[in-house]
Amino acid sequence: MKIATWNVNGINSRLAQVLEWCESERPDVLCLQESKCVDAKFPHSKLRAIGYPHIEFHGEKAYNGVAIISKHPIEDLQRNFPDDDGDAPRRLIAGTIDGVRVVNVYVPHGTKFGSDKFMFKLDWIARLRKYFDTNFELADRLLLVGDLNVAPHETDVWNPRYWQDRMHFTKPEREAIHNLKRWGFVDLFRQINDEEKAYSWWSHFHHDFEKDRGLRIDHIWASPALADNCTDCWIDKGPRGLEHPSDHAPVVAEFKL
């Protein structure tokens, strides 16, 4: 099974790129973040036309939005946290595909250190940890994928000194994400690639992509039971180099199930 995650920064703005990438790479499952469209305008028909008949999405106008696109049936669908109210930002979608529970998230950005939105981000990550504590066990075949909006370690940023007090790499954010990971998750990119410096996000300014000044904030984490079945995990920088790209690149993992 081949599973990918990609913050597309607007599904309708990047639809041609998503379609081309799916036809080329043929993932079994593609999890999207920042779809930025209401459900009625999600381009499901075009995705079904290239071989993805099973599509679930949870969107809102202009912001947020998550989706799961699959060749295989998606069962036991969940949208947002169980205790979210109806107008909560669309940041989580989960489903079971061929016996694997896939939880696709778009963690809040946080905007500014110490702000209300920053505290909301930390609280949201803590709620995510509680969600896994309550609903899952280490023996489950479980994946957490998506834009976590945090670079966990110094090897995940191009210049740790420059980023140490900036969003995505502040001490409180990293502590929050490490606490989430201590549920028992295995970072599949690190399991396969050890200390390799590779990034999944680059700003659109200062030629950061061309200079490879990025952050690794998009992740695929697995329960120990599933991590043992992972045969490869990589970041595909190709789409980031296209014209008018998302600022994120896809992250892909393969499993022998």
Image (cartoon, rainbow, N blue to C red):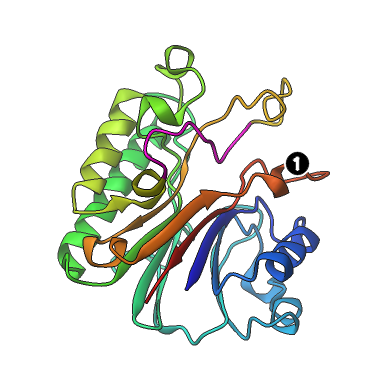
Q: Is residue 196 magenta?
A: yes
Decide whether the magenta segment is chiefly helix, strand or loop.
loop
Q: Position of residue 173 (x, y in %)?
A: 33, 32
Q: Position of residue 48 (x, y in %)?
A: 69, 83
Residue 44 to residue 186: above or below: below
Q: Locate residue 207 relative to residue 198 in the image: left or right.
A: right
Q: Locate residue 117 relative to residue 248 in the image: left or right.
A: left
Q: Residue at x 69, y 55 (%)?
A: 10
Q: Locate residue 230 relative to residue 162 in the image: left or right.
A: left
Q: Position of residue 168 (x, y in %)?
A: 44, 31
Tell me the quadrant of the picture where the C terminus can be found: bottom left
Q: Is residue 87 magenta?
A: no
Question: Dot 1 corresponds to which residue?
Answer: 241
Q: Magenta span covers which residues?
A: 193-202
Q: Position of residue 199 (x, y in %)?
A: 54, 36
Q: Is residue 35 visible?
A: yes
Residue 4 to residue 251: above or below: below
Amino acid at circle 1: Gly
Q: Residue at x 62, y 72 (%)?
A: 39
Q: Locate residue 128 relative to residue 150 in the image: left or right.
A: left
Q: Secondary structure at mark 1?
A: helix
Q: Residue at x 72, y 73 (%)?
A: 43
Q: Is residue 168 visible?
A: no
Q: Quadrant of residue 71?
A: bottom right
Q: Residue at x 66, y 54 (%)?
A: 62
